[in-house]
Image (cartoon, rainbow, N blue to C red):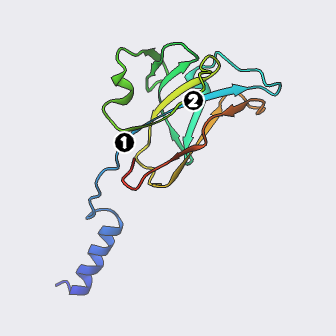
Amino acid sequence: MLSRRDVFGIAAGLISAGQLCSQAPRPVFWVKFSVTVIDSQTHYINGLKPSDFRVLEDGILQRISTFADGTKPPLLVNADGTTRPIVSAKVTQGGKPGIDLTREDGDLENSYTITYYSDPSNHNEGFRKINVEIVPDAEKQYRVRTRPGYRMSRGGL
């Protein structure tokens, strides 16, 4: 026969293991931002592909959903890294709330626009830091300019 202490011990163990606690799933939302890439002589680097970028939010790798090079139409980025044209603008947002950090200075010709759906495993409800790396730049000769991140509000967005 189990004692009261045993039952509480088992329940506490299951709760800490996540077996009894059913947390509501974290909301998924999209983040859209602009990036410019320059070399050491401040020349713009154009013609990069989505696979050339690595986006991290608070250190968590994000999967790029859409990608636009300059003023070209955005492309949908498939899970395997291939791209295809977007049929509808609703594909980017999917009816979910989002954060638009795109540049407003009009210099889209020398920038890239990237959209991703924030990974629900990120539990940070404060300032979320965005870090963008250029994968083929092993010598770190390129400089990436983008917004440093965004702040979550108390309710999520």
Residue, far front: 105
- Amino acid carrying label 1: it is Val
Depicted 57 relative to depicted 10: above or below: above
**Secondary element at image label 1:** loop
Evaluate whether residue 136 shows in this view.
no
- Amino acid carrying label 2: it is Arg
Q: Which mark is residue 103?
A: 2
Mark 1 → mark 2, Cα distance in angstroms: 23 Å
Q: Position of residue 155 (x, y in %)?
A: 36, 53
The residue carrying mark 1 is 28
In the image, 71 versus 94, the foreground residue is 71
Evaluate whether residue 127 shows in this view.
yes
Q: Position of residue 152 (x, y in %)?
A: 45, 50
Residue under the point 57% across and 29% down: 103
Residue 21: name its quadrant. bottom left
Q: Which mark is residue 155?
A: none
Q: Position of residue 136 (x, y in %)?
A: 69, 26
Residue under the point 33% across and 72% down: 13
Q: Is residue 157 left or right of residue 141?
A: left
- Which one is earlier in the sequence, the residue at label 1 or at label 2? 1
Q: Position of residue 146 (x, y in %)?
A: 62, 35
Q: Is residue 128 left or right of residue 136?
A: left
Q: Is residue 6 left or right of residue 62?
A: left
Depicted 128 relative to depicted 142: above or below: below
